[in-house]
Image (cartoon, helix red, strand yellow):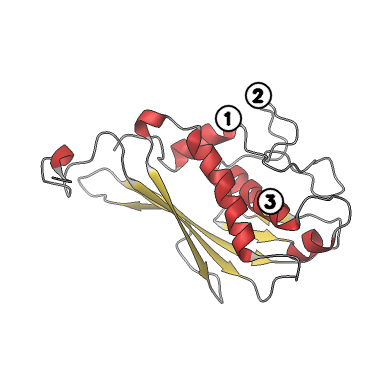
Amino acid sequence: MNLYGMVENNPINIWDILGLAEIEIVIQYNIDELPDKLSMDKIKEEFERVMNACHSKCDPCKSNTIKYTWISVEEKPENLGIQTKGGGCSRREVTGYKIYMDDYYEGETGILGSSDGNGSVSINFGAIANNNLTDINPNIIVGQTMAHEILFHEIGNYKDDTIFRTPEKGSIDEGGGIGGKKSYQVGAELSRDVCDTVCKKLAIDSSR
């Protein structure tokens, strides 16, 4: 089988017009120790479920694949945000997105997450693990909070007061936190409006 047939055996200078590329989402996290109720494997599973649900809403005829890379780090790395390659005489090509995530604590009903707009997010793991205002598994809440901060705010560049054409109550678009206006739900997803933006920003549904 000729794997480079689509690009005339010249994968350096010719792109696959169907957009069958791999987009890598790299999450570099600096967390000393998770509370007992939380599991990093479960958190990863929930975040990736949300992102994969978004991916399924992208144009299926131009759907690139997604690779997730999770790396434990001791300090904030450089070169966060959208990752590209190429340039000069050729078009720059999106290859992925790099995020830095750390931990903070602001009380059991405080803000659960924040983002700086430059590739960094903070998650209030302690507040989520210790809350008694919802019976939803805290790993699900952490994964959905991460999705809100990373996909909605960082990649989508949306604000919490954004009004969409197709609002979905209880969706991951909503802010508010535990004890606020947000109602967490098992299986919650981002709205199609947000997913459309995320797909375009990450070139998941863009032809190469």
Badge 2 is on which residue? 166
Identify the mark nearer the N-term, 2 or 3.
Answer: 3
Which sits in the foreground, 10 or 48? 48
Which residue is label 3 attached to? 145
Residue 48 in the figure: left or right of residue 129? left
The residue lying toward the viewer, choosing from 83 and 125, is 125
Three-letter amino acid code at the position of disc 3: Thr
Q: Quadrant of the N terminus?
A: top left
- Indicate left or right for 161 with 25 as reference: right
Give the quadrant of the C terminus: top left
Visible in this render: residue 173? yes
Residues marked 1 and 2 touching at CB (< 8 Å): yes
Residue type at mark 2: give it. Answer: Thr
Q: Is residue 102 above or below residue 174?
A: below
Query: Dividing the picture into quarters, in which one does residue 2 lie?
Result: top left
Residue 151 place in picture, x, y as percent: 57, 45
Please say whether residue 82 is visible from this viewpoint: no
Q: Position of residue 143 (x, y in %)?
A: 65, 53
Decide: is 122 above or below 187: below
Number of marks present in the image shown: 3
Name the residue rendered at 14%, 40% in the picture: 5
The residue wearing badge 1 is 193
Residue 168 lies, in percent from the top left, at 70, 29
